[in-house]
Amino acid sequence: MPDAERRPQPLYHRYVALGDSQTEGVGDGDDAGGLRGFADRLAEHLARHNPGLRYANLAVRGRLAGQVHEEQLGPALALRPDLATVVAGVNDVLRPGCDVGAVAGRLELMFAALTEQGARVATLTFPDPARLTPLARPLSSRVRALNDLVRAAAARRDVLVVEAAAHAVVADPRMWSTDRLHASPLGHERIAAALAQGLTLPGSDGSWALPLPPPEVPAPSGLGLAAAELRWAVGFLGPWLVRRLRGRSSGDGRTAKRPELRPVAAGSGG
């Protein structure tokens, strides 16, 4: 029997997602055909067991935690969610001079405002970036520090923390897009399943954390691995650094894809 079927199930009527590109759904679909992402997938799961569920996604790619707080919290509170996800901070950690304490403080302000209004709030821990690319090893200590601070803030505010980062499967390259910054469709599916289990939704269990089957093509090693790292640096890291130097963001000129609460047809893609 799935874990979630053993516990009483709360009903959710209004789910609001706050965050950056992961919550927007980058890596799961495209701008031409539409993005899906873990929040859309979670909303679909919720809709199967919560008749009349309405869902809004306020996330915008490239946003820092402070921007999520300043731009999305007010609209989120106005929608009066009974369930909210808040996932932000990675964009901050990537920048030189990141104040991890300040990032966690912004997240806690959002946790507090949403829970005090009566919402059930959930968030995620972030994986060690060095497990995805060796070039990101200097960021590992920041990510660990942010995860620790998020756990502490969540404990103070009665927020659910889904420890997705603790499982080995998150380091599987198939869980990530080619840019190594955004989850792949499979990764978004697993994140949604992890949140569903954390929320004890019907039909959820721990299978999301199981390893993937062995890959058909072995991972590169030696010179092949070095060449792959170089291709990634040229194709993704370089353009990202250029945007930072120019003071630009991938989210410039963008707005939330789903700013209002709308019904969700289960399994429809949102």
Image: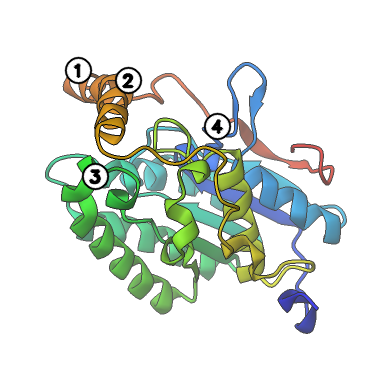
Question: In the picture, residue 25 is in which quadrant?
Answer: top right
Looking at the image, which residue is at 42% across and 41% down?
A: 219
The amino acid type found where label 3 is placed reads Pro
Residue 178, compared with residue 133, is above or below; it is above
Q: Earlier in the sequence, mark 4 or mark 3?
A: 3
Question: Tag on residue 246?
Answer: 1
Give the mark count: 4
The amino acid type found where label 2 is placed reads Gly
The amino acid type found where label 4 is placed reads Ala
Q: CA distance from mark 2 to mark 3?
A: 16 Å
**Viewer-side label of 2, 1:** 2
Q: Secondary structure at mark 4?
A: loop
Quadrant location of the C terminus?
top right
Question: Tag on residue 57?
Answer: none
Dot 2 corresponds to which residue? 235
Pointer 3 local density, CA inside 10 Å: few below 14, some 14–19, many at least 20: few
Q: CA distance from mark 2 to mark 4?
A: 27 Å
Dot 4 corresponds to which residue? 256
